[in-house]
Image (tube, rainbow, N blue to C red):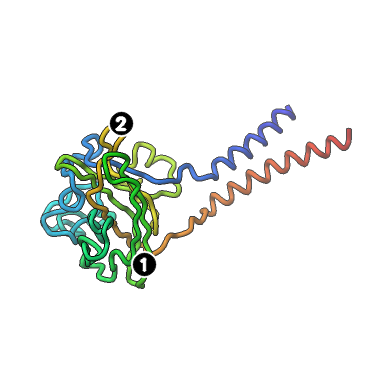
Amino acid sequence: MMKIVRCGRILFGIVALVGAMPAFAGLIQVTLPDPSVDPRDNKNDCSGFFNTSSGFSSCYVSTASISAGTGPGGKDGIDIVDRFSPVIIKFDQTDILNPGPAAPSGFDDRNSAFPTVSGIDEFQFTITNNSDSKAGGSWEYTPDDAEDPAIKYWVAKGGGGSDVGFVIHWWVENDPISCASGGWNADCLGLAVPQTSGVWETPVKDSTTNYALSHLTFYDTGNGGGTPTLIPEPGILALFGIGLVAIGATGMRRRRRAKRQ
């Protein structure tokens, strides 16, 4: 009976420690359009899938269709609680590959709500490959104004045809269930953590290649600038402590019995 109790305490400690650890942390990537997860079929992000005919500044990441008109609690026909993130800025391939005279503004389009975002001065890009192979790269964002927004989602649109979609990216820190099925749902999108850097890739073309880049688009969050530090919840800290105490107590009893023998 004592052996069973000791094993039970050890097992409880291990379970408590494992239970205190984040279930998932990492980059979520979803290729859209995808009829299995969303009925919308427009292949572009801000000129269709996430937008109305109201212009670039009316583009919002959302899992619900946006129609023209006035919606309850929001605008453009969709309630404000369903619009996860407004667009900030868009960079075409030319802006990224040839900054300067070829793209004097440093960007292709910008939301009128964010006039302080200065484009190429605040963004740095790398492209792994932009031909018929793995098209991907990285970005870094350095806000230089107190009014600059944070970045919560970013999109890489594939080029080379009207039937090519896009990949939306975001980062989550801790998710037990909602991101496990691919991520394109309100719960997983709601877990996105603001980022100041990240990686991107375009949609897959075939087994060995991705489409060349058409543009990158970045979307805001209402949580302010910068990248927050994940702080464990009190319940997680308590569970972690219980696990350590249970394992430590079992080890101490074993050492005492060994001395007596």
Can you give x and y, in whole percent of width and height, for residue 107 in the image? 24, 62
Q: Which dot marks residue 207?
A: 2
Using a 10 Å C-alpha cutoff, classify the residue at mark 2 as few (fewer than 14 neighbours), some (14 to 19) or many (20 or more).
few
What element does badge 1 sit on?
A: loop
Q: Can see residue 86? A: no
Identified by mark 1, the residue type is Pro
In this picture, residue 219 sits left or right of residue 256: left
Q: Is residue 142 above or below residue 257?
A: below
Q: Earlier in the sequence, mark 1 or mark 2?
A: 1
Residue type, numbered disc 2: Ser
Question: How many numbered discs, if any?
Answer: 2
Q: On the rendered structure, is 39 left or right of 140?
A: left
Specify the quadrant of the image occupied by residue 205: top left
Q: Residue beneath label 1, please? A: 143
Residue 74 seen in the figure: yes
* Residue at the image point whose x is 34% and y is 51% from the top: 190
- Coordinates of residue 246 in the picture (x, y in percent): 68, 42
- Above or below, 209 against 231 in this view is above
